[in-house]
Image (cartoon, grey):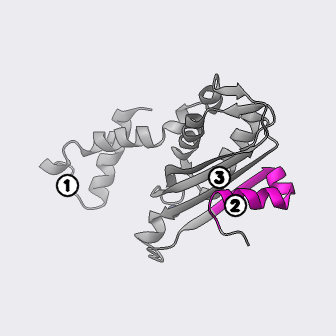
Amino acid sequence: MNNERIAALVRQLLAEIGEDPDREGLEGTPMRVAQAYEYLTSGYREDPEEIINGAVFESCSNNMIICRDIELYSLCEHHMLPFYGRCHVGYIARKKVLGLSKLARLADCYARRLQIQERLTAQIAEAIMQATEAEGVGVVMECRHLCMMMRGVAKQNSIMTTSSVLGSFHDEEATRMEFLDLIGREVR
Ligand code: ZN
């Protein structure tokens, strides 16, 4: 990423929205914005396989593994405004389990890109499935979207929920129910 070039674009943006990019308070803003975007989009420059590498462990259990409340911050691809919330991950391992901290890193790797929540949910589920060759994977994500809260319909309290279920989580209702129950969601 070329931060100099992005800073020049931000300077232009400031002028276009009616600001004076030369006033004192905005002096360092273009470069700060460039650096912020470098971080917020760092997922493009990360390889999910590399994150997982070396953190897949052998396991003989085939219990359901649950990780709740993984914090997530992403940018919507329609407005480049943040959406944020949490995701809950569950999977039933066959022989391989993933280090817990890797689940969060994997989620961040996909969240730090321009996203829609549905795709982010699916990508996390598929990455876990691929890494662990699990019997089943479930991901539920609950996020607030600033593009809805600050503009447009201005629905301040709405939370969008998405889910992606693969393998036995998709095929077997009892497994899916157990997952939803374990992450504390009402089972209907
Ligand atoms: Zn949006």
Write the residue at 32% across / 40% down. 7
CB atoms of marks 3 and 1 within 8 Å: no
In the rendered image, residue 143, in percent from the top left (x then y), is placed at 53, 61
Q: CA distance from mark 3 to mark 1?
A: 40 Å
Identify the residue under disc 2: 180
**Residue 70 place in picture, x, y as percent:** 53, 49
Image quarter (top left, top right, bottom left or bottom right) of the C terminus: bottom right
Mark 1 to mark 2 CA distance (whole Å)? 51 Å
Please tell me whether residue 86 belongs to the stretch shown in magenta: no
Query: Which amino acid is tagged 3?
Result: Thr
Circle 1 crowding by C-alpha within 10 Å: few under 14, some 14–19, many from 20: some
Question: Is 81 placed above or below 97 here?
Answer: below
| Distance from mark 3 CB to nearest ligand 1 atom below 8 Å | no
Could you say which disc has been placed on residue 121 in the image?
3
CB-based contact (under 8 Å), mark 1 and mark 2: no
Q: Earlier in the sequence, mark 3 or mark 1?
A: 1
Q: Residue furthest top?
A: 54
- Disc 2 marks a residue whose amino acid type is Leu
